[in-house]
């Protein structure tokens, strides 16, 4: 009978050890999963930041190019207007003066 009681106690102790080991394994697995989740999240955020920075740089480059094109167009238009003015200012002055003098007569 005493052997049987000792055997039951021994089995109970083994069961407690197995349960403790299983609990430890479960806690370790949960910690590993949390660590991996954090690593994946951090990696995703890092890639997202890189994509955002790349997109920002591309948009800035496009905006700079567009601005340069518009500045060049405006400069060309201003040069055309100045050339047109230079070519016609004498005639305009003569026309204005002749109209003023004609109105005075």
Image: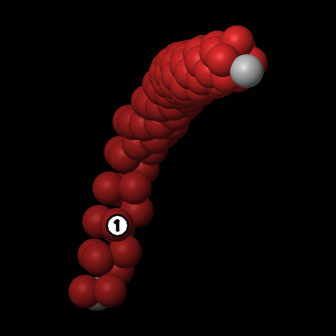
Q: Which of the 4 image quarters holds residue 86? A: top left
Q: Is residue 64 above or below residue 18?
A: below
Is residue 11 visible from the viewing direction of this image?
no
Q: Nearer the viewer, residue 2 or 35?
A: 2
For disc 1, the neighbor class at 10 Å (few under 14, some 14 to 19, many from 20) is few
Residue 25 percent location from the top left of the image: 61, 16
Residue drawn at x 73%, y 21% as measured from the top left:
1
As drawn, the residue found furthest toward the front would be 1
From this viewpoint, is residue 94 visible? Answer: yes
Which residue is more in the foreground, 66 or 11? 11
Which part of the image, by quadrant, shows the C terminus? bottom left
For label 1, the residue is 96
Q: Nearer the viewer, residue 83 or 46?
A: 46
The answer to whether residue 17 is left or right of residue 87 is right
Task: Please name whichever residue, 79 or 3, is drawn nearer the observer in this view of the structure.
Answer: 3
Q: Identify the image quadrant of residue 23.
A: top right
Q: Position of residue 10 (x, y in %)?
A: 64, 14
Q: Count the marks: how many?
A: 1
Q: How is the image coloured?
A: secondary structure
Q: Secondary structure at mark 1?
A: helix
Query: In screen coordinates, is 31 left or right of 93?
Result: right
Q: Residue at x 40, y 62 (%)?
A: 95
Question: What residue do we see at 41% from left, 42% from top?
Answer: 85
Residue ID at (35%, 80%) = 102
């Amino acid at each position: 009978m005493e052997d049987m009681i000792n055997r039951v106690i021994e089995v109970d102790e083994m069961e407690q050890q197995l349960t403790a080991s299983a609990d430890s394994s479960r806690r370790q697995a949960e910690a590993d999963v949390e660590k991996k989740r954090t690593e994946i999240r951090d990696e995703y955020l890092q890639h997202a930041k890189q994509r955002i920075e790349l997109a920002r740089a591309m948009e800035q480059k496009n905006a700079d190019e567009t601005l340069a094109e518009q500045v060049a167009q405006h400069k060309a238009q201003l040069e055309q207007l100045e050339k047109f003015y230079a070519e016609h200012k004498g005639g305009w002055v003569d026309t204005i003066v002749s109209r003023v003098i004609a109105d005075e007569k």
